[in-house]
Image (cartoon, rainbow, N blue to C red):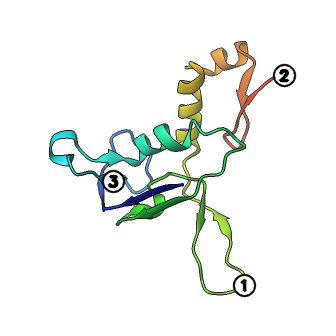
């Protein structure tokens, strides 16, 4: 379980991975000295390294928190029996692939093939058995 209650914000995207041109942020107490925490950093530290068999419940009580984890699915309740998770059409597969390449130390498609690792059409990273 992860919980954050505090300020949230938006700042100009610094790596062109956001369709709206802004990174969503968490604003920590020391943000004047250390800066805001970008959604890219939250993803890299919390979401990306999580094993596939782990479930995380994350409660973000702050402005602009709907996409601060940069997940491929979103939940928007409409108070009906059809409430469900839906694929976010604005999800950026490139961020996931970039993280996977950093995680496995792979920088090019050639290296990925040489190391028996590949990314499928949906941006999922696979290792050959």
Q: Tell me the number on the disc at residue 129.
A: 2
Q: Is residue 12 left or right of residue 78?
A: left
N-terminal of the two: label 2 or label 3?
Answer: 3
**Element under label 1?**
loop
Q: Which residue is mark 1?
A: 81
Q: Is residue 65 left or right of residue 8?
A: right
Q: Where does residue 75 sit, x and y in percent of width and height?
A: 59, 69
Question: In this picture, is 37 found above or below 73?
Answer: above
Contact? badges 1 and 2 (CB < 8 Å): no
Q: Where does residue 6 sit, x and y in percent of width and height?
A: 31, 62
- Quarter occupied by residue 82: bottom right
**Element under label 3?**
strand
Question: In this picture, is 79 found above or below 9?
Answer: below
Q: Nearer the viewer, residue 128 or 119?
A: 128
Q: Residue furthest left?
A: 32
Q: Tell me the number on the disc at residue 16.
A: none
Q: Is residue 118 left or right of residue 30?
A: right
* Alpha carbons under labels 1 and 3: distance apart: 32 Å
Q: Residue at point 21% right, 40% down?
A: 34
Q: Tell me the number on the disc at residue 26.
A: 3
N-terminal of the two: label 1 or label 2?
Answer: 1
Q: Where does residue 126 sit, x and y in percent of width and height?
A: 74, 30
Q: Residue at point 72% right, 18% down?
A: 113
């Amino acid at each position: 379980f992860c919980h954050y209650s505090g300020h949230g914000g938006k700042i100009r995207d610094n790596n062109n991975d956001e369709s709206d041109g802004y990174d969503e942020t968490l604003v920590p107490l020391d943000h004047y000295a250390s800066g805001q925490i970008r959604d890219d950093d939250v993803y890299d530290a919390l979401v990306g390294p999580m094993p596939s068999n782990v479930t995380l419940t994350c409660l973000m009580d702050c402005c602009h928190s709907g996409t601060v984890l940069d997940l491929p699915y979103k939940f928007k309740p409409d108070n009906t029996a059809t409430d469900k998770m839906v694929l976010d059409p604005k999800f950026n597969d490139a961020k996931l692939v970039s993280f996977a390449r950093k995680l496995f130390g792979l920088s090019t498609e050639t290296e990925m093939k040489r190391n028996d690792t590949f990314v499928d059409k949906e941006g999922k990273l696979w290792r050959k058995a």
